[in-house]
Amino acid sequence: MKAEDIFSAIGEIDEDIIASSSEVKKPKRKIILMIGTLAACIMFAGVGALAIASYGGGVQNRNITAVPQQNSQEGASSQSSTYTGAEQYESSDTDNYDAVEDNGSAKNTTSDNTDDESSEPYYHIAIRRAAGSDRNDDAEIQDDAAAESVYQNGTDEMPDVQEDMAAESEGQDGNSEDSLFQEDIAPEESFDISEGEDIGTNTVSGTTDIYYLQDGILQSASEELSDIRTVFDEWKRLNGIGEDVQLTGTWIEYSDSSVEYSSFDGESGVTYSPGGGVFMVGVSKELENYYDTLDPVLLRVSLRNTMSSPSVMPSDCYRCDLVIGE
Amino acid sequence: MDDEQIVELYWQRNENAINCTAEKYGKYCYSVAYNILGDASDSEESVNDTYLDAWNSMPPHRPSVLSAFLGKITRRTAIDKWRRKSADKRGSGQVPDALEELSECIPDKQSVESSFEAKHLSEVINDFIRRLPETEQKVFVRRYWHVESIQTISDKFGFSQSKVKSMLFRTRDKLRERLSREGLV
């Protein structure tokens, strides 16, 4: 007997079993405060409040601490085609973390004190929810790296590797990251997040970089736009995409992470781990109708980069993901 | 239009049956085909073949769950197409991964030798899947019948990918035991 025989036999199972497999309910997630072992938590003067995230919907209702500081032109430019959430966290100075106000609104994260070495260090505790779906950062990095090479080379001849990367990222199911026997990160002990927060038509402030394809090359244009739907419409216009493609929604999902904290006592170093939300952007499946005329990898990169602009993406998100057709 | 009405159109040999089927289940059939083939034009072709097969099957069939009936046809058609394509080169889609996982259930590489054995295998697997706990059943079917990726399944169920993989691993292990008990491996 071969695997194909089993595969074919599975195809002949009863129709009621097939039908019932289509009824899938996402379980509600419970928010449980995961306070692991904390090193000494000392709050220096000038630190914002500690808050424990409680999710009721809407950005303003969340008490989130330790958001990455979106600062300076360098920080902003890192949100462009070479931006990857993991890289930013690994390389950024921990002094750039600012706490969030008690009322739940984020502090101004567009400060310009990145290079101010005399800034007081902050001591933060951030408590993150766990048990979301694993995110495959490798696919994002590969997409962005491929796009960047085309962007920089200014050539419309795509690297041969790009097609392989696209196929690999589309077919990837996290095998490269997770062992089959890897323990779950306590999936039952997860935060009750009510399937993410729909932040609706969020306003956009400042200049937005809209990325688009021209002759197969990724380009960008800076524009002052007022809200995310306008950003999306402009992205469509620049990419020659019609009205059949719609923005279906935006929301935030939180990635797997336990307690993250950083401490500074003037002597020791600081440790932290990536956290924060993933800014989800839903697009209708009609986008795939344009894959024949526009490179699908670059097209998705262009949208992701556009939505990752500091003026668009919520400040406590470290990455943007696309959901097409769902 | 509900399934019963659509099936009735087939029985009346009303060509509108195809339009109604396409409208209601076109996307579903396409997604089943695409998961297997990973190619848009091949998937479209499979879906069109499905409509033709459905037209030829009803009558005499009168399926109670039209979506599953059509899905089965699409799956069979897509797998046949995949086999033809994979003779030339490695196919895309999730089929190679799914087959590799299922090969854990069997130690040898010989095909089933008789239609009787094939029928017995189908019955055993059907019974095995039916007896699975609800969530395990759904995850298993979505992986090996719908041929969805691990990531898609984890997103749909709200599980981590690790959990999905662990669940599938345990289920395949149980399947291997069951096949062994039945003398099929």
Image: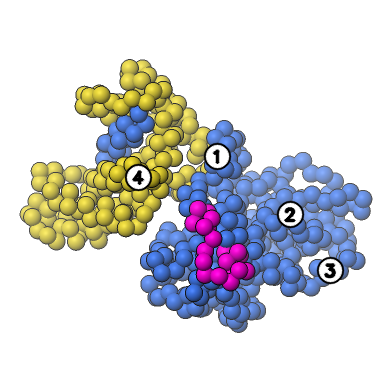
Chain colours: A blue, B yellow
Name the element at disc 2. helix
Query: In the rendering, which numbered label is found on residue A115?
Result: 3
- The chain identifier of the residue carrying mark 1 reads B
Residue A290 image offset from top left, x and y in percent: 40, 68
Q: Are marks 1 and 2 on the same chain?
A: no
The image quarter containing residue A209 is bottom right
Q: Circle 2: is it few (<14), some (14-19), or many (20+) Cα within 10 Å? A: few
Quadrant the N terminus of chain A occupies: top left
Amino acid at pointer 3: Asp
Q: Residue at x 65, y 70 (%)?
A: A310
Name the element at disc 4. helix
Residue denoted by label 4: B88
Residue denoted by label 1: B162
Amino acid at pointer 4: Asp
Q: Is residue B79 visible?
A: no
Name the element at disc 1. helix
Residue denoted by label 2: A90
